[in-house]
Image (spheres, rainbow, N blue to C red):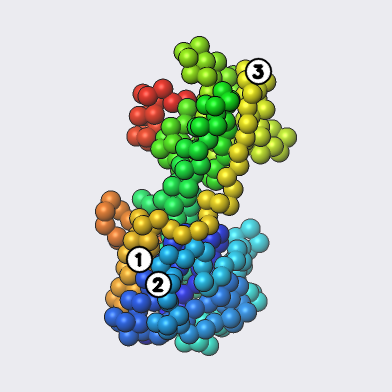
Amino acid sequence: MRIGILTAGGDCPGINATIRGVCKTAISYYGMEVYGIHNGFRGLLDDDVIQLTENSLGGLLTMGGTVLGTSRVKPFRKDRGFSLSDSRPAALLKTIHDHGLECLVCIGGNGTQNTAAMLAKAGVNVVMIPKTIDNDVFGTDISFGFDSAVSIATEAIDRLHSTASSHQRVMVIEVMGHKAGWIALHSGMAGGGDIILIPELPFNIHNIGDVIINRLKKGKPYSIVVVAEGIPTFNGKKAAQYIAEEIEYETGFETRETVLGYIQRGGSPTAFDRTLATRMGGHATELIAQKQFGRMVALRGSEIVSVPLSEVAGKLKLVTADNDLIIQGKRMGVCFG
């Protein structure tokens, strides 16, 4: 078989390990030809396609980013409507046909999931592998990239403890997560955050001020506040800036903010993400060999399985109030708003 592979959306640790897992399995075990598509779906529109060999895969396991490049180009836009005769979808399908690609492996997040589902409806053989640091791809317990991001955020929180303690300050750290608070929840709990704010749960700034004051009364002169970037704010302010200003106003305590930003998405993946990416890449190739298309690779418990794209596309996996980590956090005195 001849297959294509692309990476779309934001970069994250583990993409190259996934490319390696797909290509090594496809070439070495199944004898397939693999073609890499540069810069996501834009590469299909521009016909930017190259053949990959085993020699192309050296050093990918530990490398951050994506060797194929990425973009956020979406050839199908629901808000604008589309038909298969439109120029962009037609160009994309032509490139797939011209190169004789019998299946397209799409590595990406929610946007890629939607595009892959539309390609499947258009008759393209597609297998998707979920990647996101936000862990918000519906249908899989964990996506590679998440563990790396949480590890980076946790280390940052760990380092803030010493500064907060030395100066007896409130430290607010903002981590990624526009709609889903998985990174804030996991890094906040792992890093010993005192207050954790996520988009899914409402918060009361007066209550947060009271919690910080009460901590001081109990002999705890500093507090660590972990916030997801997607929490609601006023006047377009960034999450950390807004929360820091409000805490200082409510309590009178010196408050500092730190925005972790793109550091969470860069660099080498953790060992967990390397092995998860490798397993997912291998399973994707197995699906192709078995001609099981229109599916997304997923981690369920400890097993790598697959789910129909039609059942997961367009959905988000969000944190719910009954999450066991939230319940345990509340039992330990962590404030969630």
The residue shown at (71%, 38%) is 236
As helix, strand or loop, the secondary structure at mark 2 comes to: helix
Marks 3 and 1, the one that precedes in the sequence: 3
Residue farthest to the front, as pictured? 166
Image location of residue 280, percent across then percent down = 35, 64
Quadrant in the picture for residue 253: top right
To which residue does mark 1 refer? Answer: 278
Q: Residue at x 43, y 32 (%)?
A: 192
Q: CA distance from mark 2 to mark 3?
A: 53 Å
Q: Amino acid at mark 2?
A: Arg
Near-viewer residue (7 or 92): 7
Pick the front one: 154 or 108? 154
Percent of width and height locating residue 329: 39, 29
> What's the amino acid at mark 1?
Thr
- SS of the residue under disc 1: helix
Residue bearing the label numbered 2: 20
Of marks 2 and 3, which one's residue comes earlier in the chain? 2
**Other residues around mark 2 within 10 Å, as few (<14) / some (14–19) / many (≥20):** many
Picture coordinates of residue 11 (x, y %)? 53, 61
**Nearer-the-camera pick, 61 or 141:** 61
Tell me if I can see residue 215 in this picture. no
Cβ–Cβ under 8 Å for marks 1 and 2: yes
The residue that appears at 48% across and 55% down in the rendered structure is 132
130 w.r.t. 84: above or below:
above
Q: Which residue in the protein does label 3 denote?
A: 252
**Label 2 vs label 3, nearer the camera:** 3
Mark 1 neighbour class, 10 Å CA radius: few under 14, some 14 to 19, many 20 or more: many
Element on which disc 3 rests: loop
- Marks 3 and 1, how far apart at CA: 50 Å
Amino acid, disc 3: Gly
Disc 1/disc 2 C-alpha distance (Å):
7 Å
